Structure formats: structure tokens, C-alpha cells
Image (cartoon, rainbow, N blue to C red):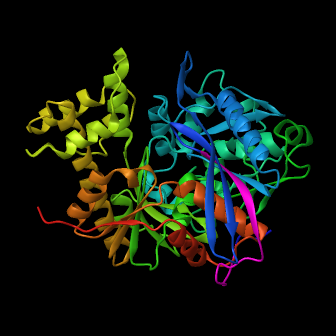
Amino acid sequence: MSGSGAGGSGRGAGAGTVAAVDLGATSGRVILGRVDGRAGTLELDHVARFPNGPVRLASGLHWDFTGLYRDLSAGLAEAFRRDPAVASVGVDSWAVDYGLLRGDRLLGEPFHYRDERNDRGVEAVHRVVPFEELYRRNGLQFLPFNTLYQLAVERDAAGGWLGLAESLLLVPDLIGFQLTGARLSERTNASTTGLLGVDTGEWDDELIERLGLPASVFAPLVSPGESFGALRPEVATELGAPAGLEVVAVGSHDTASAVVAVPMRAQSAAYISCGTWGLVGVELEHPVTTDAARAANFTNEGGVDGRVRFLHNVMGLWLLSESVRWWERDGERIDLPGLLAAAASVTAPVAVFDADDPRFLAPGDLPGRIAEWCAEQGVAAPQSRAEFARSIIESLAEAFAGAVRTASILSGVDVETIHVVGGGALNELLCQRTADRAGLPVLAGPVEATAIGNVLVQARAQGFASGDLDALRAIVAAAFPPKRYEPVAR
């Protein structure tokens, strides 16, 4: 099956249902998507939602992959009970984290990208390959948790598993293996490892060798729309799925799927996929690996249909959710809508801090770190929780607006509109302040952009829709009209 979808109006040969497994850094969900390409309609049925998060073990911060797989399996079983005619399954998740396999055995729970070990990997990699050269080769912004840095730590760790591993699979590919038995790496997520050539879209064998990594562990690459294979018979039986049901490779990096569902009608638009992270950028045909792009810490990640997601990572709503978690640590429950309403009522100026400061990456006392940043800069720190929330919103809006301006300058795209998708589309204050600070209209929605993109790539592979990304986005715009925020001068 091909995911190219060249040409066409988006009208497919039929209608059908697919199941999307969408895994985020704090929660996962299973969603049924019903697509009728002839009518140009799309409907979602939220089947299951379950928590996801880090587990602190003696060896460091890990993901509970076993629990995650159990929960998504239960969600898929419920999906097949609701609609036995589901045609395929697709899986997307966050990027960079991986599991190591020896035979069929997972060698320990995958490390979490916020684990403290990553700093050692940065120094080890840059001693061998300076960042300037890395950027020319992989096009990725510097993030200390990118897979190649994690693997440098794994390579050097006493008692580490890398020397024993036969396969390395990123999280959605690891789930694909559990479902089908196939060891494959989907390109959009593989592009975040730092080990894929930005110009070739293939594993950079020379770079892998120079870093002393075992080339044999890297699986063959597949593109969105191609098949992972059929469910293993015992999995199909356990899930109540039809024998031979196909698992389809989607844009398995959740942002790649989300960008498919950005209802852009022109190339003069920027997008913000806003959840735990805020991914701010534009969609391009070719990567931008100039010195200016490297200095601005912009990344070139793989997109569906060979597109390039030229973007910058902003810390995102993690700043708010982790602050709330910190306030709730003694058992108090905080009403988030009430907190945001109080934040919107704050009239006095609040601190606008650097949302990308690395001190905000690790879990813990984020309000205390914000106050620390303010003290260092000689500005008044927020005093109340409402002021902290407003300070976070203003700082994110400023970071988003600045990233849009930089993306426009570096790429040559004359941005006229900003699309906000994901959970951040529900945050009215954030959307309005982003419009105000950018001086551009913001179109908010859909909220479930990642699942929608996952669904549409599967639907096209199954023949329920056709056409290029513009055709798929027209379906999204019709099904989920965005909410418009006009900039207001302040």
C-alpha cells in the first residue's frame, strides 16, 4: 500500500473505520475514526483513555511500557467490540525514546527522555562529531535527549543492554512489533533520532559507525501509509480482531500525525501543535540547514508524504501541568478551568520568562524555578497561583510568537495565519495572547489533531479517502471548523 496519495480530491472509493492508538507523554487514547471519502466526512469515537507517565526506578526515570501496552490493548479490544469491521490499526507516540530487544525479549523498560543521564551523552557525541557537522547531517535542533545522545550513554554504561541487543525500536515501532512481530522503523519518528540523513531519509551508516553504535540494531525503514503487517494470530484472538487485520504505519511521531490534521488552506500558514510540548513551525518541501537555522535551534523532521516539519520545540503546557502537579503534591485538587479563569482576570503585568530555559525540563518545583529565573533577571516573580499561571501563558505566547517570526524569516514563508492544534487549542487565553503577541490571526482546532492525522493516513491506505495532504486537510476543515482569534493591540 502506498501513502503517497498523489493528486485527487480526497474522495475515496468507499467508507470505513480504522483504530488510532495515540500515545502522549501524560496519557494515551484509542479512537475509532469513521471516514467516508465519497461524502468527505470524518467522525471520531473516543473509545479509551488511560494515564501514562514516568516511573522512578533505581536505574533512573523510565516509562512503564508493560502497563502502557496492557492499557492500549484493553482499548483496542473495546474498539473491536464496538465495531468488528475495523479495517486497520495505526500507532503514534512521542519521539526519541526506544526499547532494546534480544530476540522477542524487551531488555528493560525504556528510559524516559527527561532522565538525568542524557547530559553525559551530549558531551560524548560532540567530542566525536561537533554539533555544526551533526546539524548538516541530520538537520536536528539541539535537544539533550535526542536518541543519539541517549545511545551514547547506553553504549558507555557498565552493564548496559546495547551490547546484547539485536534490535532497537522507537516506542510506536516497539508497539508495532508486539502487535505484528515485525521489526520496522517508521521514517517520521526515525528522523528524530539524529541518525537519519536529512537529505536522504535513510540511516546515516557513517555517522552510526563513527559514534560506535551497532548498525545491526537499526531496523528497515517504512513510510506512512505502508504496512507493518498483520496482527499476530494470538494478538488478534486476544483483542477480538479479525484474523489478518493490518497494522498500518502512520506518521508515528505524534507531531507528524498532528500536522496532517492542521487545516491549512495555503502554504502561508504556521502551525503550533500544543500539548506537553509546543511544536512551532511551517511545512516545507525541502530542509533548511543553514547556519542561521542551526543558531536559532530549528529542526528539520520528517513529515507525511515526504514533507519537512521545520520547527522549534517550546517547553509547552508541561510548564502549567507540572506546576499544577507540584501544587497538588500534598493532596489538594486544583480546578484547571478555574485557575485559567483566575489567570485571565489578572490585570497587573506579570513576568515573561524564557520558556526554553533548560532548568524547566526536569520534573519538580517549576514554580520555584520560575521564581529563581525572575530573581536572576531582576524582575518581580509571580506571587499567587493565578499570577504564576498567567506568567506561564504569557511566556508561552511570547515564545510561540517569536518562533513563528523566526520560522518565517529562516524559511522564506510569509506567514499570514497561525493554526493551533492539540490540547492547547482549548486554552482560550493562550490562543488569544498568541494572536496578540504575534499580531496574526490564530485558528484553533482540532483538539484531537494527532488522532485525526493517524486516522486519515490509515483511511487513505485503505481506500476510504484519497488525494494529497490538501485533500485530507479539506476533510478536517469541514469536520472540525476552527475557532478564530483576531489579534488585539495591548
Q: Tell me residue 412's x, y (percent).
A: 36, 78
Q: Position of residue 298 (x, y in %)?
A: 40, 59
The quadrant of the image that shows the C terminus is bottom left
The image position of residue 30, as x and y in percent, is 65, 45
Residue range of the region highlighted in magenta in the rendering: 4-22
Left or right: 285 in relation to 155: left
Was residue 480 drawn as part of the magenta stretch in this picture?
A: no
Residue at the spot 67% in from the left edge and 33% down from the top edge: 71
| Visible residue check, residue 196 | no
Quarter of the image where one finds residue 17: bottom right
Quarter assignment of residue 470: bottom right
Residue 20 is inside the magenta segment? yes
Residue at 73 percent of width and 40 percent of height: 78
Q: Is residue 426 left or right of residue 10?
A: left
Depth check, front residue: 478 or 56: 478
Q: Residue, x 28% and y 45% (percent of image)?
A: 355
Task: Answer with left or right where residue 264 lies relative to residue 218.
Answer: left
Please identify the quadrant where the N terminus is shown: bottom right
The foreground one among 61 and 239 is 239
**Is 307 above or below relative to 74?**
below
- Above or below 263: residue 80: above
At which x and y percent is residue 157? Answer: 60, 26
Q: Evaluate whether residue 331 shows in this view.
A: yes
Residue placed at 55% from the left, 75% from the top?
474
Residue nearest the viewer, comparing 356 with 88: 88
478 shown above or below 391: below
Q: How many marks?
A: 0
